[in-house]
Amino acid sequence: MAKQVKKAAKKTAKKVAKKPIKKAAKKTAKKSAKKSAKKSAKKSAPKKAARPAPAQKGRRFLIIYHAPIESMEQTANMTPEQQAQGMAMWNAWAKRVGSKLHDLGAPLINGKRLRANGSTSPSTKDVAGYSLLQAEDWDDVMDLLEGHPHVSGWHPEASIEIHETMELPGM
């Protein structure tokens, strides 16, 4: 019993001794954090007024990739080497398009249709993905899509749908 009392007393003494150290450490950490925040704010403060980013020329186009659902399953079952080869084609296209590729987008799965009455059902549109392009006009966007990997022959029913976005005032 005496041993247990001694152990408990030692633990309590250690805790009491650590508390002031922890509080002091917290105060020091807070002070140094405030000082470094002030210094970094001074360093990062612009000397001249920041210029707004230049507006991109041209119009924006939504590129919608269509493919049957089984083609998505086919892609999922490819070897890592085959997937890497497919991504290399996409990366090469993205590099060729350059700054006109506003958003490479992503593959899409599990689409749902939402109706005005709030009911939902699975989408039947076979939408496989999307991208956003910035182009001068329709001729430019068609040139950008020439040789696109989605319609390179990986699936005979793969297609691309293009929609020009419409700017709305105030948005």
Image: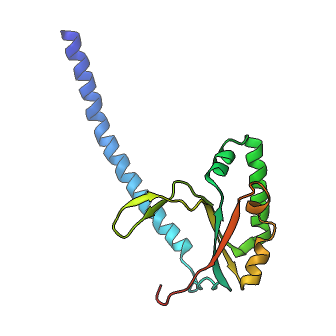
Q: Quadrant of residue 137?
A: bottom right
Percent x, y for residue 90? 75, 59
User: Which residue: 59% across, 81% down?
Assistant: 165
Percent x, y for residue 98? 75, 71
Q: Is residue 89 above or below residue 17?
A: below
Q: Which image quarter holds the N terminus?
A: top left
Percent x, y for residue 13? 25, 28
Q: Of residues 10 and 86, which is closer to you in this image?
A: 86
Horizontally, is 108 left or right of 170 in the view?
Answer: right
On the question of residue 74 being in view, the answer is: yes
User: Which residue: 37% across, 47% down?
Assistant: 25
Q: Of residues 2 and 164, which is closer to you in this image?
A: 164
User: Which residue: 29% across, 39% down?
Assistant: 19
Q: How many marks?
A: 0
On the question of residue 104 being in view, the answer is: no
The residue positioned farthest toward the bottom in the image shown: 169
